[in-house]
Structure formats: structure tokens, C-alpha cells
Amino acid sequence: MNNINPLLDKFDTAPFSKIKTEHFKPAILEGIKLANKEIDSIVKLEEESNFENTIEALEFSGKQLDRITSIFFNLNSAETNEEIQRIAHEVSPLLSEFKNDVILNKALFTKVKQVYTNKEKLGLNAEQEMLLDNKYKAFTRNGANLPEDKKNELRDIDKKLSALTLKFGENVLAETNRFELQVTNEADLAGLPDHLIEEAAAVANQKNKEGWIFTLEYPSYIPFMKYSQNRELRKKMALAFGAKGFHNDELDNQKNVLEIANLRFKRAKLLGFNSHAAFVLEERMAETPEKVDTFLEELLEKAKPAAQKEFKELESFAKELDHIDHLEKWDAAYYQEKLKQKLFDLDDEVLKPYFQLEKVIDGVFTVANKLYELHFTEVFDIDKYHPDVKTYRVSNKDEEEVALFYADFHPRAGKRDGAWMTVYKSQEVSNNKNERPHISIVCNFSKPSKTSPSLLTFNEVTTLFHEFGHALHGMLANTTYPSLSGTSVYWDFVELPSQILENWCYEPEALKLFAKHYKTGEVIPQELVDKIKKAASFHEGMATLRQISFGKLDMSWHAINPQFVTDVKAHEDEAFAPTKLYPNVQENCMSTSFSHIFQGGYSAGYYSYKWAEVLDADAFEYFQEKGIFSKEVAQKFKDHVLSQGGTKHPMDLYKLFRGKEPQPDALLKRAGLIKK
């Protein structure tokens, strides 16, 4: 037993209450030491290399380190502080070095290569073959064949990248936290919903300031931009939001963006690829940067005329309503909401009482039960890293354990913006036991106020379903090897399980299960459901154009040699030119806070949201044909997609589920971009 450091004890669930911040670095150092010993024992083995003693042994090495780092980096996203951030800077280069020590270990690669060369004679099953291919590629794609001097160069690049991406994220979080809009004149609250005003008063009170304080956290920023009648204040908020990391001060990210892009390019060239995108996309369904460009261009061709028409309508509407001559970016959400209310008589604030957070959680659980016969029981004996976190045991119809599920729903100062799914313990089969996963989703929804529970916008409802779709992918994993389990799939396939689940939010049959007024218990009226369905493709042309613009910006950084880019803003403006609708805002720059691609795992992968939409629209069409709660279709989706992880090529899995390749028409019809 290790009485001093709980992270070095054997544990099943993360021992959050026992962990002190000072435990992390020693535990990670010890974890690296243990993992190195396991690698050494593979290398020093005198018997001939085979699948079990080399490939499987490598797969199951470093488990303790994986558990420790998953806890640490998840906390660095969801409950961070200066001390955790400092440790992250210290350990990231060490972890990068360890990873390279494994990948660039010549003796280890020789053993892996030996097994790979003999793979035809080994009688492996499909999953074992995939594991062998992946392990071999992990070495060859990451420098195992490089001469020694180039290996050292690669190590240096990886160390620098791990530090830079961390710094990028810290700057974005610090920028989000340091801005506040203090309102002291009640007239400036015109148009804002009561719950938002109440929350802003609570924030001001907390900070011992008068009036109301609005922040750049999503539950404050988004409704402010949507409802505030004060155009000047909307402008102030939008400029602050759009200028994160773009102030030429200690939190500026321009230099970080340029360095990250250049280091990624150098790394790709070192490994024999034309660009970072070429390196990344070799292991994606899209395969090449050219295919991604073609995909985005084809979508642009369909979406741009619709987006331009929608934009003109919005301009005319704003002019007619408020004599606005030129629509600016800070007008977008406000006038879109007003126009939506006019066209569909649909207001998010009218919908919110039907989407109490607790009921939506019950709803998503009920949908999962009807589709996959899963049961969720809230439990109170699991260690948590924050009181806001809820914990659930997940079981199947035979009352067998399926997963442990953590859910963290509300914003805090130590939590980054957005929503994500993560894993604390992977599913795997070891020592003949199917180890079940520990899965978490993290969101940023409005907190309950003194007068009402946490009520979600419809957009937040779809966000919860989206992240829960990822969670199901993790929970229902049923593979032997952890690196092929759950969401360990091609990046442009990983969004299919999340995006398909959003579709149930629009179906009356599903909505009636959970959309109930928090005061009266009345089920959402059919007329509101009809309006939600009608409004689903409202301004879909503009929404699609926006997603294409992000995909294009991503590729503009990663599909080129960025060494000649010196001006981040000018480069971004050029990338956005084909999709531009609103006037350019000189004070704003998206790249400097584009965490998906400069901190998360979406570099050269942002297109995958739209790519997966093609898959999800086509897949959901199958559910609609047979019934949205069809046990037959759900079973196929579970058997061929959710449980299989990365054991087969995604297109093979998709065809096993659907019987054919996906057709883009389903997406274009759903978006209203072509006629049904």
C-alpha cells in the first residue's frame, strides 16, 4: 500500500477526495518509471517476439500512468487552478519525452516490426490485426525510421508543442475570466430575460459590486447577445469575446498560433508528409487535404446561395425593425432571434420552462433505455472533484454493470468553456475480465437561481444530447484492447454517435418523455414541437457557411507551409473571404482563441463535424424509416458502431449498420438546402 500518494495505490474509481495537488507530479514521475520498466521487460525478453509478448504487452503497458494523467488533465480542464496549470507545464514535456522514448526505441521497434512482418502467419482475428497495424503505424508515422539526429529534432518539437498548446488554453481561460461587463443602469437591461438578470445580480453580489455583471462564459454571453436591446453593450461584449488572446499583452496568443502551426508543419515534413493536414488525414476517413477541400467546396456551393439570401432577409428585417443600415456581427444573434420569433412565433424563453435540466437528464436516460435497454441510477458513494458533479451507475437489462457515469453541468472559474466528453477509465478485457469504463461529460449550463431551477435553452438541450451520444459510445464499448475501445476511432467518425442523438430532440415521440413545464408538469404542447421542427432549418445556410468557415480556417493553418505567415489576422481574413457575410471586425481574431484546433484534438479535423453530419443524417433516416425507437435499428447501431470502437475501418462498420455507404442528400434535405 502507498499511504502517502493515493494516485499510486490501486484504485478503481478516481480517489478525488484523497488527492492533493502536490500528489500529481510525483505520481506522474513514478508512473513514467513504472511504464518504462514494463517497456524494458518487453525489450529484454529473450524469447522470439510474438503478438502476445510484444504487441499485447505494449498495449497493456503504462496503465497506471494513463489513469493518473487522465485524472490530472481532466481536472486541468474542469477544475483547474494556478498550481495545477504550473504542474501541467512541468509534466507535459516529461510525458512528451516518455512517449517519444517509446516510439523512438529502436530495440522495441525491431520487435514490433518482426511481429508485423510475420502477421500473415499469425492467425489473428480482425481486432488483433487492427491493433498490430496501429502499433506498427504508431512507430513508423512518428519517427521510428528516422536517423538519430532527426529523432532528437522530433523530440524537441514535441516538447515545445506540448508546452505551447497548454499555454494557448491557459490564455483563453484567463481572458474569459478577466472580462466583465458591469451594468449599473437598469435601463441597460432592456430585453434580457429575468433568469439572466438574476444570475448577473448574483455575480455582482458575489464580487461585492453594485448592479449586474455579465461575463464571457457561455450561459451569460450567449443570451446577452441574443436578447440585449442595447446595441452598444452587445458590441462591447462581442468585441471582448472575439478578441480573446488578441490584445498584444501577456495573454496574447498570436505568437503561440504561429509557433504551433510552424512546429506542426516541421514535424510533418520531418516524417515525410507535405503538411500537418496530410499527416493527420492519412488516418481519417477523408484521407487527404484535397478530399477535405473538395468536401468543403461542394458544401459551400450548396450553402452559400442560401446563406446570402438569408443574410439579405436579415438585413431587411433589421432595417425595417430598427433602421439598422449595416448589420454587424454583434447584431447577428439578436436579429436572428427576433426574426425567428416573427416567422415561427418561437422564443427560446418560452421553451426554457419545458427544459428543466433534471428532466432533460431523465429524458436522455429514457431515450438510452428505450434504444439500448440501459438503466441509470444516481449514486452518492463515488468520489467527486466538485460538489456540482453527479454520479450514476449504468446497468443493462440483466442488471450487469455497463459503466460509471460522471456529469458536470455548470460553469466555474476553473473550468474551460464549451462541452466535452472524457474518460477516466477505458473499457478493456484483461485477465479474462471485461473492465467496464468510467465516462464523464462536462458542460456549461446556467445554474439554478433563487427563483427557478436550471432551465436549458433548446440549443443547450441538443448540446446535452450530443455529449451524451459520445458518452454512449464510451459506455457501450465492448472490445478487448483499450486503444481500440469506445471513442478511439477516426476523428471524422467520432462525431457520428454524438450528432445522431441530437435528432431525438426534434421528435415529438421523444420530447413528450421529458419536455415538461417545471411548474405545472404540462407536456410541451404539440404546437411548440411543430414550431421547433419548422425552425430546425432556420438560417441553416448561414449556420452551414459558419461551420465551413471554421473548417477552412483550420485547413488554412494546417494544409500549408505556414512559415511565410507573419500576420495572424490577415491570414485569417483571407481564409474567411469565401464565406464572409458580415463586415470584418478589425479588433477581433478567431484563431487566437480557436481552442478546438490549437489546444484540443481537432487540428486538420474541424471539417469532421460536417463530415459526420452526412453520416448522422443518413443514419437517422434509417431510424425514421423503421421508427425512432426501433429496437432492430438500435441493436444494429449498437452492434456495429457503438460497441466496436476502432476495431474495423469506420466505413466498414457504417456499411455493416446501414447496408450501404452514406448519401449526402439526407443532410442537404434536412438542412433545407435541397428539396425533399
Image (cartoon, helix red, strand yellow):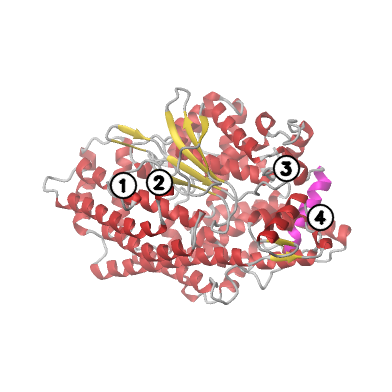
Q: Which of disc 1 and disc 4 is earlier in sequence?
A: 1
Q: Is residue 32 left or right of residue 72?
A: left
Crowdedness near tag 4: few (<14), some (14–19) or many (≥20) residues, C-alpha within 10 Å: few
Tell me: residue 42, above or below residue 532: below
Q: CA distance from mark 3 to mark 2?
A: 36 Å
Q: Which of disc 4 and disc 3 is earlier in sequence?
A: 4
Dot 2: element: loop
Q: Amino acid at mark 2?
A: Pro
Q: Which of disc 2 and disc 1 is earlier in sequence?
A: 1
Q: For the magenta stretch, what is the residue range?
A: 330-344
Q: CA distance from mark 3 to mark 4?
A: 16 Å
Q: Which of disc 2 and disc 3 is earlier in sequence?
A: 2
Front of the two marks 2 and 4 = 2
Q: Amino acid at mark 1?
A: Asp
Q: Main secondary structure of the magenta part?
A: helix
Q: Nearer the viewer, residue 165 or 295?
A: 165
Quarter of the C terminus within the rendering: top right
Q: Which of disc 1 and disc 3 is earlier in sequence?
A: 1
Residue contact between numbered discs 1 and 2, judged by CB atoms under 8 Å: yes
Residue contact between numbered discs 3 and 2, judged by CB atoms under 8 Å: no
Which residue bears the numbered disc 2? 15
Tell me: residue 328, above or below residue 620: below
Q: Is residue 335 magenta?
A: yes
Q: CA distance from mark 1 to mark 2?
A: 10 Å
Crowdedness near tag 1: few (<14), some (14–19) or many (≥20) residues, C-alpha within 10 Å: some
Dot 3: element: helix
At x 31% / y 70%, what residue is drawn?
Answer: 153
Q: Which of disc 4 and disc 2 is earlier in sequence?
A: 2
Q: Nearer the viewer, residue 64 or 107?
A: 64
Which residue bears the numbered disc 3? 352
